Image (tube, rainbow, N blue to C red):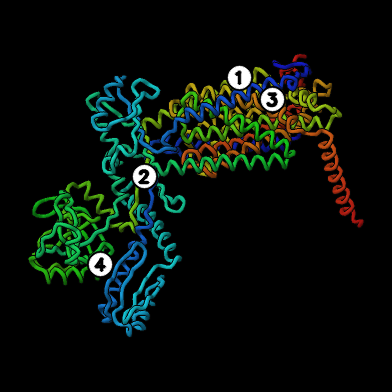
Amino acid sequence: MEFFSGNKVYDFMGKSKIFAAISSFLIILSLFTILTKGFNWGIDFKGGIEIQVRFEKPVDIAEVRKYIGKKFKGANITTFGEPNEILIRLNVEQVSGDVQKSLGEEIRKLLSPLGEVEIRRVDIVGAKVGNELKEKGLKALIFAVIGILIYVSFRFEWKFALASVLALVHDTIISLGAVSAFNIEVNLDVLAAILTLMGYSLNDTIVVFDRIREEVRETKIKDLATLINIAISKTLSRTVLTSLTTFFVVLTLFLFGGEIIKPFSFTLLVGIIVGTYSSIFIASPLLIWLGFNIDEYRKKLAEKEKRKKEKEKMRQIYQGGVV
Amino acid sequence: MMKKLNYRLVIFLLATVFGIAFTIPSFIGKSPRVNLGLDLQGGMYLVLGVKQDEAIKNKIKTIASTIKYISEKKELFIDNLTIDKNSVKFELIDKDDEKKMDEELKAIPGIEIKKKYKNGSVEYIVTLTPQEIQKTKEDAIKLAVQTIRSRLDAFGLAEPSVTRQGKDKIVVELPGIKTEKEKQNIKKLISSAAHLELYLVDEEHRVTTPEEAKKYGDILLPDKDNPNRKWLLKTPPVIDGSMITNATVGFTQKTNQPAIFFTLNSEGAKIFGDVTGKNVGKKLAIVVDNRVYSAPTIQERIGGGSGQITVGTPDEAHILAIALRSGSLPAPVVLLEQRSVGASLGADSIRQSMIALISGFVIVVLFMAWYYRLAGIIADIALITNLFLIIAVMALFGATLTLPGMAGIVLTVGMAVDANVIINERIKELIKEGKPIRQAIEGGYKNAMSAILDANITTLIAAIALFAYGTGTIKGFAITMAIGIMASMLTAILGTHGIWEFLLASGKKITPKDFGMKE
């Protein structure tokens, strides 16, 4: 089986302006959504209380609201995955210190008129902890970006590094935009998903960049756009295949992995699509826009090669015992 | 046969055997096995903050009472002894005593002294040195970790874990807690300071406010059962918790109420004997964490250094006894975060993520075999070994598998075949260029190397960032990702290469069809 047989070279760069327009639109839309609508922060980051309970039979949510409301005003109550699973959200301030000690028991008592209740999960996060986690999450993102910048600069060139990081920022913003637009709860798992998709999107970009580097080294093509087109076309099968397998598994995770892991798998699903798209249509043209110069890079590579050979020669002389 | 083996295949086979051998224990419940995180097996996760400032306050208080003791004993008269947040101030009435006072203060470790001279008197300001403050804070958290650990051990829980996090936090992980009642008891056990004091009750005065109480050198503390009822107690306390050597639960002889029987050390026993002997007919209040549990009338001198505290329920008695036995917390702790997952939810999470893992795995395996034929099957073999390796390495390092960690494994399945996709595409390219199969395979592995390495290392950087700044379950995700990436490099690059070499050496005819190409 082959998806892209033959050695056809597609003209990706010729249409790069269209994709630049699409991406710009998506980024502006995402930023707009994030800034106006904001995020649905989970208790990991804003602090609060979540109690997940399960009834034997599906229950009327209005009934649950009524019984909970007897003691806790302004609780947010929703079903969670199954119709007999209920998630109760409370603010930390709603619960005084003493009640907090026996919160699960308290809720069970309140809901007992509705039948047998099982307390499945009680999460209490203080507001201070939430802020700390936010700070830590931000640090992790920054640390990852800097680490990646350094590594890619070292392995390629700073323009490659900048292009890949810009593509990364592009993917992150659009994924976060989707998280905001679809009202996905932002918890620690979503942060993990964002970092994973950064790694994933970069993975994709690097494979394409690696091919561009190779084409620069091994061919005499002068035109960057042509060269990039060849590199992308040659890696296209791989890009599509890997994206497909990864997309499939994340889809199974999204469909079968349960309610708790949904925010995580949703973010990743979006991230895989955007990451694949950006490594072809955004990261590579960025190299052109950043003014990547083939001739200079060839010279640099040649020099590197020369130095390596000289070193090799010296070593041989040493080992030969002739100084 | 031996000649056909190559070093790559041998390493791969060893890795496979290793992987399977150390995966089996996890599935039959033997050691070494993968630890399930609290979100998968059910249990409670607590983050406690230690109020280190309180420890410093206590230290300052102790210094103040030492100074008072010195002045009384050595007849160095002082006035206006006040305790601030982090300093003690007092006035030495006679300037001529300055030298003597300085000499006495020198014996107290870790303090700094500032002096102001007034007409005839000297004002002393005593503060803790920065090193002493640091040490006090450090001791407070270290001791809190120890104390909480020994309390939980005494409570008889399975594998409690108490670890320090950062400067002032403690993480307590308790697997296998089931009922809400249990949770409640444990939270009480952990968070109670368990500061026991015995005070003589001041029965001569009647006061209503703390300020009034202070005038008589007393304090006003609430009753345990009825917080509106206040007791007037003479300070300083007769005995404090540090003198307790043992505490057990039992029932009182006359009323058959649950009670704690405590024993004092020799110093405590002596003081207890003296005080009770001198105060027959008066009331002695038993105070725990600033609440009066009871205040029985002293019938006679109590020798032998033991006493009892009557408590509401046997459960409560049990918890308090453990807390008293393991010593009081040097600084109060506050609950910052609590996460508890019921066993049934954990089991559901395992089931759901297993379904996702298996179905994702089957899809990828079938897809690879369909698209790449033999090359796909070889990649699939590597993928299976990869899964075994992840579980085996996690089991050996005692890593914890969390729900996001399960997601990480699912993701690894999708991404692990990437290396083989890159390699196979490279091999196909060379075949198309007309290279013989053997050369195409060798060349394909060589050409694919730099892309695979660079791509995996960048992903690894993201995983390290997650591990460095992540907490709890997220760390588990980062660990499985990192192990998965490294295992996939071994299986997908080395392993598949070895299998090809073996096939070529054993004379199997390999055609472009084996890479899913048309002839």
Q: Amino acid at mark 1?
A: Leu
Badge number at residue B265: 4
Residue situated in front as seen by the camera: B452 or A107: A107
Q: Are marks 3 and 2 in contact (CB under 8 Å)?
A: no
Front residue of this view, candidates B131 and B454 = B131
Residue holding disc 3 = A280
The mark that comes first in sequence, 1 or 2, is 2
Q: Are the numbered discs 4 and 1 placed on the same chain, yes or no?
A: yes
Which is in the foreground here, disc 4 or disc 2? 4
Residue at 25 percent of width and 35 percent of height:
A106
Cα–Cα gap, marks 4 and 1:
73 Å
Residue A73 is drawn in which quadrant? Answer: top left
Q: Is residue B306 visible?
A: no
Q: CA distance from mark 3 to mark 4?
A: 77 Å
Residue A108 position by quadrant: top left
State whether discs 3 and 4 lie on one chain.
no
Q: Marks 4 and 1: CB-CB under 8 Å?
A: no
- The answer to whether dots 1 and 2 both sit on one chain is yes
Residue at point 55%, 41% (across, down) = A140
**In the image, farthest residue toward the right:** A322
Residue under label 2: B158
Question: What chain letter is assigned to the residue under label 2?
Answer: B
Horizontal arrangement in the rendering, residue A166 relative to residue B326 (left or right): right
**Location of the C terminus of chain B (image quadrant):** top right
Label 1: which residue? B366
Q: Amino acid at mark 2?
A: Ala
Question: Label 4 lies in what chain?
Answer: B
Query: What kind of element bears circle 3?
Result: helix
Q: Do the CB atoms of the residues marked 4 and 2 lie less than 8 Å apart? A: no
Q: Which of labels 3 and 4 is toward the front?
A: 3
